[in-house]
Image: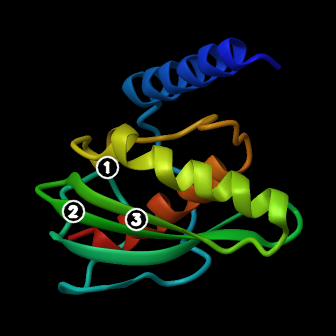
Amino acid sequence: MSALRRKIATALVGISATATIAACDTTETAGAPSSPASRTGTAGSPSHRGPYEDGEYTVDGEYGTRGSSIGVTVTLESDEITAVDVTPHATDETSLALQRRFADAVPRLVVGKEIDDVSLDRVAGNSHTPAGFNDALEKIKAEASG
């Protein structure tokens, strides 16, 4: 793929992810999270649409059939994501490179957005890692429910 085609593809992926966030479905995912979140703040009730307790929440988001995961730390203020950090967990070189690209792209897509308005689809060439991020957000919402 030429450098120009890569740039165009990257731009389209960014636009696609932004459109996905803007037009996301607000329906809840049923069920309890598969693992608890660690955070600073007070304990919350079961998952629901905001409001959420302000604080910093750290979870592992799981995806795929091979036990793939990423670490996600989100800071919430008034239900808005004010900071995000994604920590790659992959050990395979190719998967690690994809997770790192995803981690670099996520902040500009989610910081400043209401947590209930964020659902990523395909980001920075990743079609599976966003599912881990979305899983992490569901866990965070469940933990932050107040």
- Distance of label 1 from label 3 (alpha carbons): 14 Å
Residue 35, image quadrant: bottom right
Which quarter of the rendered picture does the C terminus lie within?
Answer: bottom left
- Distance of label 2 from label 3 (alpha carbons): 12 Å
Q: Nearer the viewer, residue 15 or 144?
A: 15
**Residue 95 spot, x, y in % from top left:** 79, 59
Residue under the image location 88 percent in, 63 percent down? 65
Residue holding disc 2: 76
Which is in the foreground here, disc 1 or disc 3? 3
Residue holding disc 1: 115
Q: Residue 53: tell me if it is visible.
A: yes
State which tag comes first along the sequence, 2 or 3. 2
Q: Are marks 1 and 3 in contact (CB under 8 Å)?
A: no
Which is in the foreground here, disc 2 or disc 3? 3
Label placed on residue 140 = none
Residue under the image location 65 percent in, 57 percent down? 99
Q: Are marks 1 and 2 in contact (CB under 8 Å)?
A: yes
Amino acid carrying label 2: it is Leu
The relative height of residue 73 versus residue 64 in the rendered view (above or below) is below
Crowding at mark 3 (Cα within 10 Å: few <14, some 14-19, many 20+): some
Q: Please give left or right for residue 7 compared with residue 24 in the image.
A: right
Crowding at mark 1 (Cα within 10 Å: few <14, some 14-19, many 20+): many
Residue 118, image quadrant: top left
Disc 3, SS: strand
**Residue 3 spot, x, y in % from top left:** 70, 19
Residue holding disc 3: 85
State which tag comes first along the sequence, 1 or 3. 3
Crowding at mark 2 (Cα within 10 Å: few <14, some 14-19, many 20+): many
**Residue 25 spot, x, y in % from top left:** 47, 31
State which tag comes first along the sequence, 1 or 2. 2
